[in-house]
Image (cartoon, rainbow, N blue to C red):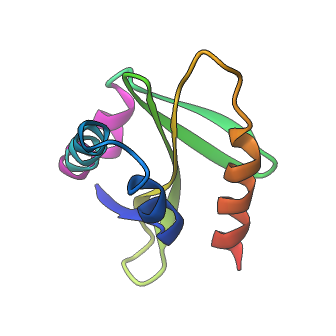
């Protein structure tokens, strides 16, 4: 599957430790080597609805990679996975949804 990242995602990666970055890069590599069906059968991905937008969450240990599926009009509507945001789970409740909404809004503009 084609996998892309947003500018926001790339900025967020830099805030993670080297070890966490390696986990993120391996997840990107694995997703790139799989079909959509294989990816969704791994048990590491879930989804939620954000308004009209389906947000997919790849879970790698305590790291959450938030993604959307985009269809390319230039490649006969081929689907691509787009990594849009990251979060490291902690014991505290997160205010992550505010950042996620910002990432989605930036994609729409």
* Residue 45 falls left or right of residue 41: right
Q: How many marks?
A: 0
Most distant residue in the top direction? 91
Residue 5, relative to residue 15: is it above or below?
below
* Residue 105 falls left or right of residue 11: right
Query: Which quarter of the figure is the C terminus placed in?
Result: bottom right
Residue numbers of the magenta segment: 30-41
The reply to whether the magenta stretch includes residue 97 is no
Query: Is residue 93 or residue 66 the one in the foreground?
Result: 93
Question: Where residue 24 sits in the image (x, y, percent)?
Answer: 31, 43
Question: Where residue 27 sits in the image (x, y, percent)?
Answer: 28, 41
Which residue is at 28% across, 55% downward?
1
Question: Where residue 98 sits in the image (x, y, percent)?
Answer: 77, 48
Query: Is residue 69 or residue 102 the one in the foreground?
Result: 102
Where, by quadrant of the figure, is residue 18 drawn? top left
Query: Is residue 25 or residue 15 the one in the foreground?
Result: 15
Residue 103, relative to residue 25: is it above or below?
below
Which residue is at 74% across, 37% downward?
95
* Residue 95 falls left or right of residue 83: right
Which residue is at 73% across, 42% downward?
97
Residue 55, relative to residue 62: is it above or below?
below
Dominant secondary structure, magenta = helix
Question: Where residue 22 sits in the image (x, y, percent)?
Answer: 22, 42
The reply to whether the magenta stretch includes residue 32 is yes
* Residue 47 falls left or right of residue 4: right
Which residue is at 20% across, 49% downward?
29
Most distant residue in the right direction? 51
């Amino acid at each position: 599957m084609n996998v892309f990242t947003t500018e926001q995602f790339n900025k967020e990666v830099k805030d993670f430790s080297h070890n966490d970055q390696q986990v993120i890069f391996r997840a990107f590599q694995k997703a790139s080597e799989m079909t959509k069906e294989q990816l969704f059968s791994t048990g590491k991905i879930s989804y939620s609805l954000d308004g009209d937008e389906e947000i997919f969450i790849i879970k790698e240990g305590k790291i959450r990679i938030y993604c959307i599926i985009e269809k390319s009009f230039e490649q006969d509507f081929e689907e691509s996975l787009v990594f849009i945001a990251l979060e490291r789970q902690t014991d505290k409740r997160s205010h992550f949804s505010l950042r996620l909404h910002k990432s989605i809004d930036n994609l729409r503009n």
